Image: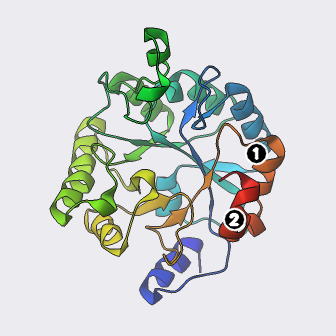
Amino acid sequence: MNQQMMLHQDKRNNKNIDYDWPLILAYHSVNQERKDSLAVSTIDFDNQLAWLKKQGYRSLTLAEFLLQPVKKGEKVVIITFDDGYADNYHLAFPILKRYGFVATIFLVSDYINTDQIFYWDVPKISNNYEQSLYKLLTWEQVQEMLDYGIEFGSHTCTHPELSSLSREQCIEEITRSRQDLEAKLGREVVSFCYPRGKLNTEVIQLVEQAGYRGAVVTPKRSGIPLNPYTLRRVGIYQQTTPSVFRLKLTPLMRKNYERFKWLLGA
């Protein structure tokens, strides 16, 4: 039985599982000049990919994992980025290409190709130059990466905390973002990421009903069984040192995040 079949079987049984889920890394920004926790330096990002390559990891997009069988025990890494920062194109993309890796980028669909700055970034900005460090992707940049093999998934329309919205608002954010992205990209959008990791049973069901094939959450949420719509990621941040990076990737730490998160730096 392949890994995808096992995940779907678990969804039907609604039970927690103990076998290894796919290694999915969660990034946001790759930027040498940003100093906030969401920004991994270009040097660190390069070193992390170099280590993965040396260890024999093969890179897949989340869509490839969801739609194609993966041999059990195969060393696969799924690299994901949240929010759609422009430095994903300017700085992360060249490094991904250097190592022959792909990635999945989750876009906030209403904000692409705009001058929008996320509300959590506004307090970090004191001048026009700093504001440029928080710019978002353009559709032209998205298309170039798409042509290379980068996957784009949905991170909703406006990045709300879905668990705090009404059912109708959730449906709007989850469904319209997929429709708008498919219209722009000209292909099916199968992957979803929950903003700020906020979810509940109803939100998960709405994501499935909207037509996505799978979704990711960071970090592990207690009481939420693992299935294709709650795939857990390993968060990588500015404070993630080389030793912590390698430690976070071990099966023991991935399965026992709540116990060891103080050691891992979240």
* Total marks placed: 2
**Quarter residue 256 falls in:** bottom right
**Measured from the top left, where is residue 61 in percent x and y?**
53, 49
**Measured from the top left, where is residue 89 in percent x and y?**
50, 26
**Measured from the top left, where is residue 183 in percent x and y?**
22, 40
* Nearest the eye: 71 or 211: 211
SS type, badge 1: helix
Q: Residue furthest bottom?
A: 13
* Nearest the eye: 183 or 127: 127
Look at label 1 and name its amino acid. Leu
Examine the rendering and report whether any part of residue 68 can be seen: no
Mark 1–mark 2 distance (CA, rounded to whole Å): 16 Å
Q: How is the image coloured?
A: rainbow
Figure check: 1 above or below 248: below
Horizontal relation, residue 79 to residue 243: left or right: left
* Nearest the eye: 183 or 25: 25
Horizontal relation, residue 192 to residue 185: left or right: right
Q: Label 2 belongs to which residue?
A: 254
Q: Residue furthest top?
A: 128
Q: Which marked residue is nearer to the observer: mark 1 or mark 2? A: 2
Give the numbered dot on residue 52: 1
Look at label 2 and name its amino acid. Arg
Examine the rendering and report whether any part of residue 128 can be seen: yes
